Amino acid sequence: MPILSPLPGPVGAHSASWQIELREAIRSGEELCRRLRLPAAAASSAAEQDFSVFAPESYVSRMRPGDPADPLLRQVLAVGEETRPVAGFHHDPVGDRAALRQTGLIHKYQGRALLVTTGICAVHCRYCFRRHFPYAEQTAKDMDAALAAIRSDDSIEEVLLSGGDPLTLSDHRIASLVERLAEIGHVRRLRFHSRLPIVIPSRVTSELVDVLRGTRLTTWMVVHANHAREICDQTVAALGRLVDRGVPVLNQAVLLRGVNDSVEAQCELATALVDARVTPYYLHLLDKVAGAAHFDVPESKGQELIQAMRRQLPGYAVPRLVREVPGEPGKRFLA
Ligand SMILES: *Cc1c(COP(=O)(O)O)cnc(C)c1O
Ligand code: SF4
């Protein structure tokens, strides 16, 4: 199964507001087009067969109604171009299946291991390199085995919590995972990779921040925004709640045609991030995943954008341009 969506249906009496938002999210291109006053023909149900549409209202509310080229809409609406096979675009573009040490643990780089905590995301990004990743329901036994593998390898200093999106887990589940990782003596740092602080800012509750700070481990947060319009007032406040409490926040973005492939769009994104006290970390070239070819931007264009940003922005506001190359010991730096 590819990236999963949260279950629809009634919510429990004690659900947090972010959990209700996930349940009530838009789940089809047709519904998304209706919400934004676009013709239903803008969506492709054939593309949805392969990877479903999923977008919560707080994210959709930042889109411009009636604009089929809206940079936020483009990231989530399934379109006909996805179904066209393009040479060089594959189902496992970054070699994660080969590096999957066992269910849920990807250990590719020195000192860092990536734990797949869930297959569920708070938004389905059409360009996602994991859109075809074979997520299975993570069982308690899989998690035990993944933690045992981390325990048995004392070269692992940092554990990346990824998915899917780890912040779709309840605070209770996150707390128990953090506690178990903190029991492993050689683990020093945790790094959450999550799009939730951007997409549903109410996810950053004080209880969550308590969990992130209430451990001997140093916790870093890497969020994922691709366009300045994703950084709305509520998102700035959510990011501020992390930074105020001492959780350093980085952003990674993907360079996407028709979304952020201009100097202006990149400078606006970087400025919005540093104003929110978030450091732009990586600008990824698109992973060549089947269904995403229409987002591809050439490497030379990425390098030009970074050069232009260096002329206009403070050094700390310019991300590193990277590409993931299967089999290499880290991301490949391109600028
Ligand atoms: C990107 C990635 C990391 C982290 O790399 P950094 O350069 O430290 O951000 C770790 N493990 C996997 C599998 C990755 O894809
Ligand atoms: S890019 Fe991240 S948030 Fe988006 S679908 Fe992929 S894993 Fe989920």
Image (tube, helix red, strand yellow):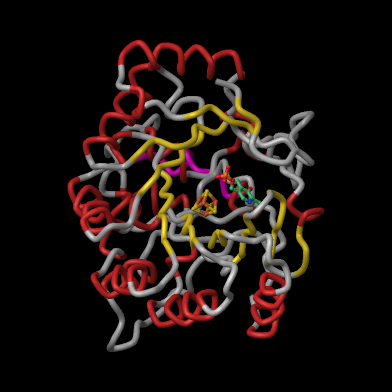
Q: Position of residue 181 (x, y in %)?
A: 54, 74
Say if 281 sits above or below 137 in the image. Answer: above
**x 38%, y 39%: residue:** 72
Callout count: 0
Q: Is residue 332 magenta?
A: no
Residue at the far right: name it. Answer: 98
Classify residue 326 as left or right of residue 125.
right
**x 55%, y 33%: residue:** 284
Q: Position of residue 235 (x, y in %)?
A: 25, 50
Q: Position of residue 158 (x, y in %)?
A: 56, 59
> Looking at the rendering, which quadrant does residue 58 occupy?
bottom left
In terms of depth relative to the viewer, which is nearer, 126 or 165?
Answer: 165
> Which residues lie in the magenta part?
38-45
Classify residue 189 as left or right of residue 151.
left
In terms of depth relative to the viewer, which is nearer, 301 or 219?
Answer: 219
Classify residue 62 as left or right of residue 260.
left
Quadrant in which the C terminus is drawn = top right
Q: Position of residue 9 (x, y in %)?
A: 41, 79
Say if 226 sits above or below 22 in the image. Answer: above
**x 38%, y 71%: residue:** 23
Q: Is residue 42 magenta?
A: yes
Quadrant in which the N terminus is drawn = bottom right
In terms of depth relative to the viewer, which is nearer, 87 or 77?
Answer: 87
